Image (cartoon, rainbow, N blue to C red):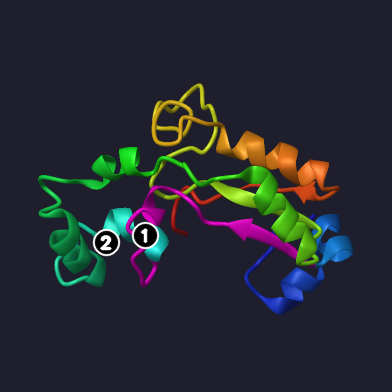
Amino acid sequence: MARCEPSWPSLRNHNTPALLRDDKFGIYTHWGIYSVPACGPNGSWYGHNMYRPGNPQFEFHEKTYGPASEFGYKDLIPKFDGSNFDADEWAKIFKSSGARFAGPVAEHHDGFSLWNSKVNEWNSTRMGPRRDVTGELEKAFRAQGMRFMVALHHAEQ
């Protein structure tokens, strides 16, 4: 198969994945350490922007937590405790919205894995919620008859 290029003609020459062709509507979530401050714009880039003077997230961080040199991104992890996280509740809400598939961004640019990673100690089973968030969501979505997907946002392209 020919390489896919960033153009409509190129995309037309490649098959649409069955998941998107058949199910059409799905939901994927951004929920991670960056959800603790929940500060936008580009809230999921908080871990990067909080260290950049002149950025709204830098200003928010300094005002809320103090200097990033004293309270850094890693210090938000204990606050990301997942105490209100309920995978079954999410699955029921997503299913009732009409979604046919769903899943999390299981690892964002910050490198924090939302599963029990064997290669990354920075994960949700060792710190933060101390739960396999991705595994819980997979079971809950499948129990609702939905397909499960995972997005990985390792690096900006």
**Mark 2 vs 1: CB contact within 8 A:** yes
Q: Is residue 23 left or right of residue 155?
A: right
Residue 60: say if magenta: no
Query: Going 53% across and 27% down the picture, which residue do you hit?
Result: 116
Q: Is residue 1 above or below residue 119?
A: below
Circle 1 crowding by C-alpha within 10 Å: few under 14, some 14–19, many from 20: some
Query: Going 24% across and 41% down the picture, which residue do you hit?
Result: 75
Q: Secondary structure at mark 1?
A: helix
Which quadrant holds residue 20? bottom right
Query: Going 62% across and 71% down the picture, which residue do you hit?
Result: 6
Residue 102 x %, y %: 71, 54
Query: Going 47% across and 34% down the picture, which residue do you hit?
Result: 124
Residue 36 x %, y %: 36, 53
Q: Amino acid at mark 2?
A: Asn
Q: Residue furthest top?
A: 118
Prevailing secondary structure class for the magenta stretch in the rendered image: loop
Task: Measure how far apart labels 2 and 1 are at the Cα level.
Answer: 6 Å
Q: Camera-side residue: 49 or 125?
A: 125
Q: Amino acid at mark 1?
A: Trp
Circle 2 crowding by C-alpha within 10 Å: few under 14, some 14–19, many from 20: many
Q: Which mark is residue 45?
A: 1
Q: Which mark is residue 32?
A: none
Residue 88 x %, y %: 69, 45
Q: Camera-side residue: 73 or 145?
A: 145
Which quadrant holds residue 123? top left
* Range of magenta residues: 25-42
Q: Which mark is residue 49?
A: 2
- Is residue 95 at least partly visible in the picture? yes
